[in-house]
Amino acid sequence: MNPDAWSQPSRRRVLLALAALATVVVLMIGVVAMGATAANPDVARVQTVAREALIAEHEIGIVPNGGNAVTQAVREQMLAQARDLVTTHYTGTLMQTRLAQFQDAVRAAGGGGPIVLDGGTKDISFGNVTIDGTSATVRLRATTFLKVAQSVDGPVANPQNIADYRFQLEKVDGRWLIVDEELEFVPGFGP
């Protein structure tokens, strides 16, 4: 074929068509990659369950009024909140374990031992989330903190830790619940 047979407008059209095709392919790959998680509403649901449980685990024993005179009524309210949290976020043996831990934390609140004045979770960043039918795994990194005193007027300690968490969830009666939870402290940021 004669090289002059390709006219300048003809070459330009072919190059533009190839550039347009490459652009479309790149955009399609991006849409498919973003849609893999955005299309599955369960991703947001399992992340929410993991985040709420983690936050609550670090707030459950906080004594109202700075540890002054925790009444039986306040303690009962805290126990009810602990039961509600456990039944809406956990299942299986982990549910029983968490319920016992939370109840112990509430019973200890204002009972003469260390007083939890504040606590919580911040800087939560989600890693890999996988969903396979009715099973899911959520990985995240978070900073947890605590404000604790030995007595109402005693010195206050403010420990912080950074850890990587792995939550295993199962879908039970249409709800995602945590069946297992592990953490590994980031080197240099644990107790």
Image (cartoon, grey):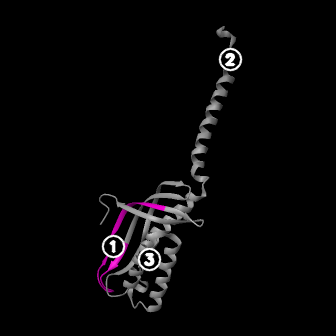
Q: CA distance from mark 1 to mark 3?
A: 25 Å
Quarter of the rendering occupied by the N terminus: top right
Q: Which residue is mark 1?
A: 158
Quarter of the rendering occupied by the C terminus: bottom left
Q: Which residue is mark 3?
A: 99
Mark 1 closeness class: few <14, some 14–19, many ≥20 residues within 10 Å: few
Q: Nearer the viewer, residue 187 or 176?
A: 176
Q: Nearer the viewer, residue 53 or 26?
A: 53
Tell me which segment is drawn in magenta. 146-168
Q: Amino acid at mark 2?
A: Gln
Query: Residue at the spot x=41%, y=82% of the render?
Result: 106
Query: Residue at the spot x=33%, y=73% of the render?
Result: 158
Q: Amino acid at mark 1?
A: Asn
Left or right placement of residue 155 versus residue 125 in this view = left
Q: Which mark is residue 79?
A: none
Residue 155 picture location, percent across and down: 29, 80
Mark found first going from the N terminus, 1 or 3: 3
Q: Which residue is mark 2?
A: 8
Give the residue furthest to the top.
Answer: 2
Q: Amino acid at mark 3?
A: Leu
- Where 137 sits versus 13, above or below? below
Taking the image as drawn, is residue 134 in sight?
A: yes
Left or right placement of residue 4 versus residue 130 in this view = right
Instruction: Describe the element under mark 3 as helix, strand or loop.
Output: helix
Mark found first going from the N terminus, 2 or 1: 2
Mark found first going from the N terminus, 2 or 3: 2
Q: Quadrant of residue 9?
A: top right
Residue 99 picture location, percent across and down: 44, 76
Residue 57 picture location, percent across and down: 43, 72
Q: Nearer the viewer, residue 113 or 130?
A: 130
- Where 115 sits versus 127, above or below? below
Magenta: main secondary structure = strand
